[in-house]
Amino acid sequence: MRQLADLVPTHVLNFESYVPSRPDDVLMRQYGVERLYRLNNNENALGPPPAAQEVLAAFPPERGAVYPSGDCFFLRQALSDAFGKAPDRFLVGNGSCEVITSVIKAFCQPGDNIVTADKTFAVYEWVAAFSGIEPRLVPLKDYALDPQAMLAAMTGRTKVVFVCNPNNPTGSWWSRDTLERFLRAVGGRAIVVLDEAYREFVDDPDFPDGMEVMERHPNVLVFRTFSKMYGLAALRVGYLCGGLEAVDIVRRTHLVYSVNSLGQLAAKAALEDDGTHAAATRRMVAQAGEYLKSVFDSLGLEHVSGAGNFIMARVPIPDTLLYRLLMKQGVMIRTMTGFRFPNWIRVTLAREPAMEAFAKALRSSLDKR
Amino acid sequence: MDTILSLTTPPDVAFARVLTTAAEALAQSRGLGKRESMRFQLAVEEFFTYLAQVAHEDCAIQTVLTGKPYQVCASLQFQASGLCLGALNASCTTSLDGAGEAANDLGLILAGRVADRFRLTRDGESSFTLHAEVDKAYPAAKAPPSTVTFKPPYRAGLEHDPNRLMHAAALAAARYPAWHCPASFQTPGKFADLVRAGQFTCVLALDEASHPAGLLCWARSGEKGLSFSGPFVFAPQEDAPQVARMLADAFLATVAREKIEIVFSERATQDTPDGYFETLGTLTRYDEAGQSEQPVLYRHLREDMGETVWADPALEGFLRGVYDRLAMCRDVLAAQPFGASGPSERKSSLFSTTMDKGKGLAVLRPLLDGEDMAANLAGHVRVLSDKGFLNILLYMDLSQAWEASLAGPVMDAGFKPRLVLPFAGRSDVAVFQYAPAR
């Protein structure tokens, strides 16, 4: 009999599967703590907007037996209304991870490559790698994506360029001019994905709006999510928007029925929020950001904080050791070695008690070393 | 690319000649010298002949011969009950006069001695694979060229060029004590072949003119770990910290998304930059000049998911202390002390022994337990000490209850638990060191 491994393509055999964090109660038992502040996944501590919360509370249990709308009909209609674009220009996925997969499947075949940064959201690289597509990774420059180097990395087989704007985990972002120059230089040779998962946290007028940019560049696809600003991470709803032709191509590889009914309803309600929730979240994030910057400054720690609800800091011990020391005190952060930033941590900006718990645990951990 | 010959034969000595012919052809095709080729043939012949006598009659022996650029290897998979390979112990002192009961083991003793190293893996209750390796011989390092004037800026990245690698290995061997260097630095050609074969991976720091300014290399260790050596820095003292940091950054960035959990080093140099690794503890380095403490460094690459380990009562307190100090969550299961569940199923225990003469270092790993555990350990210590090995370590994989249960006899034999290498085996590995009487 053949070995099971003989049936597996080399690029899958060599791929390291991602191991997510264990559930909170398991972690609390392992680390012997009674409460755990999750500051590792950039979740919104304020939760979903009130309208979405009402929808969640009112969901009739018997609807659990009924399939969701396979193509998120009403949610796409709501997105259409919100952005003034045809519903067929939107594709909704089970989080942005699913739409990343759909785009790579739609445009890439063996021998092709994608271009992105070496220190950015890892899923672009992962999906390409386990699909047998070469990820070409470009180093950051001053903690930001380097447009010239990304252009230089493109080849005749580059099909998709992923631009995380703002970039996770550094929070850096390209201005309107930078993006425009980049898109002109690409000149339609590849699909350019603008991943705007954290764009709702930016209120700078110089931040480019992908929804507007795509009207001048038909090769642009914009990704957004309900997980971050809208606090619906548990329900996994993300979407892409682009020109009709591009979206029609991606739709061919995109699974239907992957977004559940509750997620569709909550996301639609969140879209209809009057902006109060986003404003409150921005206030919380700004306050937490100032507080943590002062904590890092007082400890003499270098930190990077651009847009987004997170901050990144360089620590004087291995980030993975600090993770364990903080976990022993009930605080969970994201280690950055996996982002190729050894000895850096990323901390979600959240409410005061969580930020104070983090600061106290950080001081205590570093004092002992 | 490796050359692989696979032969499935009955456990019948009549087939030994087929195997030795294949072994000879393989060794020649890989450019091994006559002496190494003969050793390989002999190891294959004697192992097969012995196993043909002890393996289940109705089960075939599968022999896989692998030729790599730097070595040839034989892996013999077989089925046997009550397997006893005591004669393979480095401590075996049976007289080689061919008389009496010991004569049955002569072939096995010979095979163990002519191979550069061997190991046994247990694939099931009565299914085993015996691996024996013979290395290609390489010329020793020549004295590296005299001082180079380095020109910053420096850069660091993966290196594959064999000439540059050989040069850097020779520089490291000349500037750093043997304790810190992989043995292959003494024969840089072998080091370059190991890199070519993927056994080692290297990052090299280069100056503006592409002179090697530093080296850090690593090899896989166990299923989840990488063991690194270095950083070796050749740049002037004032640039050394910068070069060392570049090497550490390039190393960690390279391996950050690989299929491993940890990196560690039992021989990291004093040039290791602060803050990149945790200190697990120290090992004592004994040599003619005396003794010194050598830190053992480690770091996770991702968040700790916890682990389950077995612990003998004799070791439990030590383990819990280590895990508490390292803030690691572990479920510690109680292993029955050795002998508590009655006599062992076999008379002779077995340890694999890896020796590095340059470092005066011998490493023991338990392969099979047996009634003679205490005597066998004492024998190993005596024989290795007589041969001049002042540094004797024993590695115990705590994922195996039977292995963990050996802690009592190991400590009774004069070994002290020094540290734990997290995830270095199937789970954590306890490292014991023999403390010689001074």
Image (tube, rainbow, N blue to C red):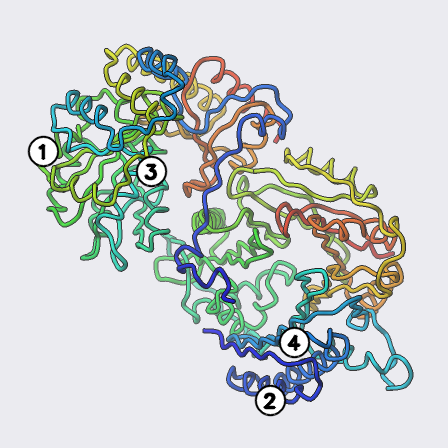
Q: Which residue occupies the foreground of this view, A42 or B210?
A: A42
Q: Chain of mark 4?
A: B
Q: CA distance from mark 1 to mark 3?
A: 24 Å
Q: CA distance from mark 2 to mark 1?
A: 72 Å
Assess disc 4: are there few (<14), some (14-19) or many (≥20) residues with their C-alpha within 10 Å of its C-alpha: many
Element marked by disc 2 = helix
Please name the amino acid that badge 1 sits on. Answer: Glu
Task: Say which of marks 4 and 3 sits in front.
Answer: 4
Q: Chain of mark 1?
A: A
Q: Residue B310 in the image: state x and y as whole percent.
A: 73, 44
Circle 1 residue: A215
- Is the C terminus of chain B in the top left, top right, bottom left or bottom right quadrant? bottom right
Assess disc 1: are there few (<14), some (14-19) or many (≥20) residues with their C-alpha within 10 Å of its C-alpha: few
Q: Chain of mark 3?
A: A
Q: CA distance from mark 2 to mark 3?
A: 55 Å
Element marked by disc 4 = strand
Circle 3 residue: A97
